[in-house]
Amino acid sequence: MSFPEYLSDRWPTIAQMMFEHAQVVLIAIGIATVLGIGIGIAVEGHPLASRLALGLTGTMLTIPSLALFGLLIPLFGLGLAPTIAALVLYAVFPILRNTITGLESVPGAVEEAARGMGLSRLSRLVRIRLPLAWPIVLTGVRVATIMTVAIAAIAAAVAGPGLGELIFIGLARIGGANALNDTLAGTLGVALLALVLDLLFVALSRLTISRGIR
């Protein structure tokens, strides 16, 4: 069966897998964004705490993804839970790093002016510092999202949802009927999903970042 014929026959299944892949990535990114920004706000301005937080979260990126998924099986079993847990662990670091960097990049003169206007620390954070840091923070979220789209494909090793199932099935049956088509469809699906999500972040940046600080 040619690849176009394969796609014509299997596109509903592939579309469902792509939806599940996007769903698990966005859930993980949502959790990682809350954690990354929250921790970044808490440790920013405290060099030792910042280094410790970045060191711990950065260590997660040194663990091979297949090994991390395997280590999470005793804790979460198979399926959705270990998939989301692993993706969150990988995604936190770029978001945390960019949150700290973004907050530290806010000019001191702006901070002093806001303090002189009588704004509290919380008000300065919400109304001044976070909006100015947002372009850098959003870049961290964008990088984390594209990264986890690829890593999520490996979640098929722990029965996770998404396009990784097609890739693993194809590789397991290499040389058999439609094995190459399965692998190619899964790989192209992951690449297409990464491209779509990246374009969504471009649109989000235009909607959430004022023209004056782009």
Image (cartoon, rainbow, N blue to C red):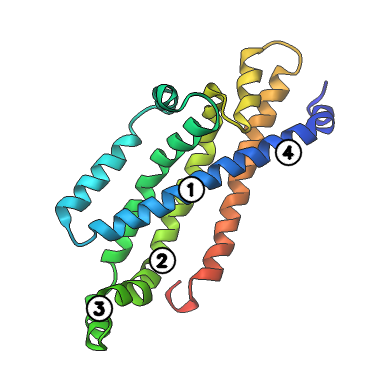
The mark that comes first in sequence, 4 or 1, is 4
What residue type is disc 2 on? Trp
Q: Which residue is mark 3?
A: 111
As helix, strand or loop, the secondary structure at mark 2 comes to helix
Q: CA distance from mark 3 to mark 1?
A: 30 Å
What residue type is disc 4 on? Ala
Horizontal placement of 24 versus 15: left or right? Answer: left
The mark that comes first in sequence, 3 or 2, is 3
Q: CA distance from mark 4 to mark 2?
A: 33 Å
Q: Quadrant of the C terminus?
A: bottom left
Which mark is on residue 29? 1
How many residues crowd around disc 3 within 10 Å: few (fewer than 14), some, or many (20 or more)?
some
Q: Name the residue rendered at 20%, 45% in the picture.
A: 52
Q: Which residue is mark 2?
A: 134
Which mark is on residue 15? 4
Q: Name the residue rendered at 56%, 70% in the picture.
A: 207
Q: Quadrant of the N terminus?
A: top right
Quarter of the image where one finds residue 192? top right
The mark that comes first in sequence, 1 or 2, is 1
Residue 78 x/y as whole percent = 52, 24
The mark that comes first in sequence, 3 or 1, is 1
